[in-house]
Amino acid sequence: MYLYRSVDSEGNTIDFYLSESRDKQAAKRFFKKALAFSYVSKPRVITVDKNPAYPIAIQELKEEKQIPEGIQLR
């Protein structure tokens, strides 16, 4: 199992997701879930590890208008 976890700038956990795979579909599912909560403000920056699926998932979500264009991926 792979753990996807989002934290805010203070280190507090916003959301998490367990997945059997670490691919584009899992990354998209997690990002959509984590950003869907109304109490979570939209991030300025998303910091990730070197998984090559993240940039692809983020770009697809931007094209689908699921996340704003201005978010920086670091």
Image (cartoon, grey):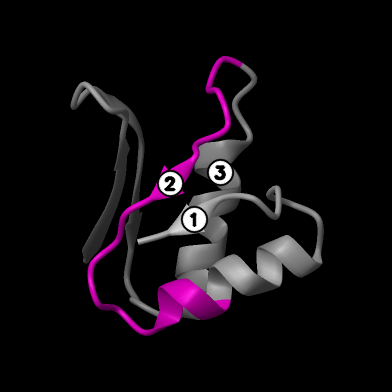
Cα distance in 3D space between marks 2 and 3: 17 Å
- How crowded is the residue under tag 1: few (<14 C-alpha within 10 Å), some, or many (20+)? few
Q: Secondary structure at mark 2?
A: strand
Q: Looking at the image, tell me whether mark 2 or mark 1 is earlier in sequence order.
A: 2
- Rendering quarter of residue 64: bottom right
Q: Which of the pair 74/54 is nearer the observer?
A: 74
Crowding at mark 3 (Cα within 10 Å: few <14, some 14-19, many 20+)? few
Is residue 7 one of those drawn in magenta? no
- Label 2 environment density (alpha carbons within 10 Å; few <14, some 14–19, many ≥20): few
Q: Above or below — where is 4 with respect to 51?
A: above
Q: Amino acid at mark 3?
A: Lys
Query: What span is in magenta?
Result: 39-56
The tally of labels here is 3
Answer whether residue 54 is magenta in the image: yes
Q: Is residue 22 left or right of residue 69?
A: left
- Is residue 45 toward the left or the right of residue 74 in the image? right
Ranked by sequence position, the earlier of labels 1 and 3 is 3
- Residue 58: percent from the left, percent from the top? 57, 66
Marks 2 and 1 close (CB-CB < 8 Å)? yes
The C terminus is located in which quarter?
Answer: bottom left
Q: Amino acid at mark 2?
A: Val
Q: Please say if 61 is above or below 37.
A: below
Identity of the amino acid at label 1? Gln
Residue at disc 1, secondary structure: strand
Numbered mark located on residue 45 in the image: 2
Q: Quadrant of residue 23?
A: bottom left
Q: Position of residue 70 (x, y in %)?
A: 64, 50
Q: Which residue is mark 3?
A: 33
Image-based side of 26 in relation to 48, left or right: right
| Element on which disc 3 rests | helix
Say which residue label 1 marks. Answer: 72
Main secondary structure of the magenta stretch = loop
